[in-house]
Image (cartoon, rainbow, N blue to C red):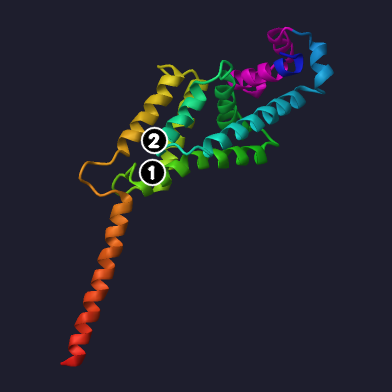
């Protein structure tokens, strides 16, 4: 790995583990196996290095998440892919967890990253919202009584972000990958259609059919009344 790429990777990891205040250039250089002078060869300051790292990995994240959005897999599989994207995959997938920690925990605290944070947040919500909507429409998933699609989306994302925050605070009692998988498994269990119960799409069709039947009956009654 080239020295600039190595510095970006180490900066992201330190930012995820320690926060912005905990990123020291001497420690970063030692971790990357370069001199402090090498950092200034590529970056003008600590702020420049951190911004470059966030921008570099944000572009990679959005590109990979767009690939996930383009998937034609089923709703449950697509939701699972959100978690698996964070915890599994290629050999260097650790950067995904590092970046997710930075994006959801640190980025909100740092000035000048508002547009990046909004872009990542919009893509992340879409990544969860689309399969939930399609799953409800197709009957693969079923909304719990009284819940909406946005309720489910918020619950999924709150659980992921909350797990990341607890991991950053070293408050998780189980490995992060296990926690995230358990969270998604619980969500999917709650969305599983009940045998014999109407799905959201079926219920909607029945409701529309019932309305049409009621209107037809009222029309027939008015016609009879007019004839009499």
* Residue 8 among those drawn in magenta: yes
> Is 44 situated left or right of 73 in this image?
right
> Residue 77 placed where, x, y %?
41, 33
- Start-end of magenta stretch: 7-33
The total of numbered circles placed on residues is 2
Q: Residue at x 27, y 59 (%)?
A: 206
Q: Residue at x 24, y 70 (%)?
A: 213
Vertical relation: 15 (above or below) 115 = above
Residue that lies at the very extreme toward the front in this rendered image = 72
Query: Which SS type dominates the magenta stretch?
Result: helix
Q: Is residue 165 visible?
A: no
In the image shown, does 109 or 184 lie closer to the viewer? 184
* Horizontal arrangement in the rendering, residue 130 relative to residue 196 (left or right): right
Pointer 1 with pointer 2, Cβ within 8 A:
yes
The residue carrying pointer 1 sits among few (fewer than 14), some (14 to 19) or many (20 or more) residues within 10 Å by Cα, namely many
Q: Nearer the viewer, residue 31 or 111?
A: 31
Quarter holding the C terminus is: bottom left
Q: Check disc 1 and report the residue beneath it.
A: 135
Q: Residue 8: which numbered mark, if any?
A: none
Give the residue at mark 2.
Answer: 76
Q: Quadrant of residue 179?
A: top left
Q: Position of residue 162 (x, y in %)?
A: 46, 30
Q: Residue at x 46, y 28 (%)?
A: 83
Distance between the alpha carbons at the discs numbered 1 and 2: 8 Å
- Label 2: element kind: helix
From what the image shows, is residue 90 above or below residue 56?
above
């Amino acid at each position: 790995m080239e020295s600039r790429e190595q510095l970006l990777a180490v900066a992201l990891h330190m930012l995820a583990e320690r926060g912005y205040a905990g990123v020291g250039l001497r420690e970063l250089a030692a971790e990357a196996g370069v001199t402090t002078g090498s950092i200034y060869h590529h970056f003008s300051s600590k702020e420049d290095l951190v911004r470059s790292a966030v921008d570099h990995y944000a572009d990679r994240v959005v590109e990979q998440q767009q690939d996930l959005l383009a998937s034609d897999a089923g709703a449950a599989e697509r939701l699972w892919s959100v978690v698996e994207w964070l915890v599994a995959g290629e050999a260097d997938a650790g950067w995904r967890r590092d970046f997710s920690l930075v994006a959801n925990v640190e980025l909100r605290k740092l000035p000048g990253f508002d547009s990046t944070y909004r872009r990542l947040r919009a893509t992340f919500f879409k990544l969860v919202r689309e399969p939930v909507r399609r799953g409800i429409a197709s009957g693969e998933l079923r909304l719990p009584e009284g819940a909406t699609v946005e309720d489910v989306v918020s619950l999924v994302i709150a659980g992921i972000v909350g797990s990341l925050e607890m991991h950053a605070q070293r408050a998780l009692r189980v490995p992060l990958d296990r926690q995230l998988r358990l969270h998604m498994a619980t969500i999917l269990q709650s969305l599983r259609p009940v045998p014999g119960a109407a799905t959201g799409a079926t219920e909607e069709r029945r409701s529309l059919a019932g309305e049409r039947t009621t209107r037809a009956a009222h029309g027939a009654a008015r016609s009879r009344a007019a004839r009499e």
